[in-house]
Amino acid sequence: MKYLTLLLLFPGLVYAQQDSNPPMEGFNADDSHPQAIEIADQVMASMGGRAAWDNARYLSWTIFGEDHVWDKWTGRFRWQGDSTVVLMNIHTMEGRAFKDGNEITPADELLAGAYRDWINAGYWLLMPYKLKDSGVTLGYKGEETMANGHEAHVLTLRFDGVGLTPDNGYDVYVNKELNLVEQWSYYADADADEQPRFTTTWEGYESYGDIMLADTRAVVNSESNVRRVSNLGVYSDLPDSVFEDPNQISLASLTETGTY
């Protein structure tokens, strides 16, 4: 469906911030709601802006008990879990895997697993920056009150043949005053599921370098089910050893070796 009527009524709605936050190639602008696109641009601006996001080269984070360091410019990626280390490039899928510093061969399964984790764990951290990604269709669901009592615009994210789980979908709740994502709901099958599998908050926004990240995901209506993202860092420079050392490293040490 194309939102021709809204475009005619509000011709500046889609293009107001297009130059400052152009969509990724393959974003479904034709079938996306113009108000949802405008809100996505406002989210990007509130998170630091597109230029700041593009210039944020290195990111580190720990979630679900696993460490991640990503060179966003080149695709180099370090994954750590227990005694296992995977060093790879997510663009080429080439890399090596190690356990206790000893190389594991063949490494195909571990490389594929690290890549899946980069997609999943990365989305849990960076979703607000990916609202206009390739294959995404943005819808506008209306206004709702979030679990924290704040009023929100609700966007719908649907995917067309991208990622490992293209049937997934999300409702994304954007604080109407702050233009920050403060809640999301997950649907395993966006076409079939009448209710989300879970809804969590997005809390704890802080500045890292020139961008903002949120470190807490609390399941709504569950006081005990809280996920925290630790070892958050955004760096302009990191030593090559971060992507070459087969031994476990402390992500906390990156604050000493990296440059913001």
Image (spheres, rainbow, N blue to C red):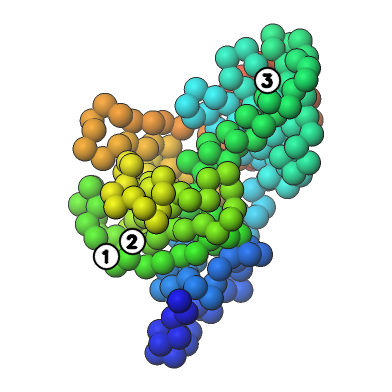
Name the residue carrying label 1.
143
Label 2 close to label 1 by CB (< 8 Å): yes
Q: Position of residue 187 (x, y in %)?
A: 38, 48
Q: Which residue is mark 2?
A: 154
Q: Residue at x 65, y 55 (%)?
A: 54
Q: Amino acid at mark 1?
A: Glu
Q: CA distance from mark 3 to mark 2?
A: 39 Å
Q: Which mark is residue 85?
A: 3
Q: Residue at x 30, y 29 (%)?
A: 225
Tell me the kind of residue under disc 3. Answer: Val
Find numbered disc 1 in the image and state the secondary structure of the residue it sits on: strand
- The three-letter code of the residue at mark 2 reads Val
| Precedes in sequence: disc 3 or disc 2 | 3
Circle 2: element type: strand
Q: What's the distance in space between the residues labelled 2 and 1, CA to CA?
A: 6 Å
Residue drawn at 52 percent across, 28 percent down: 62
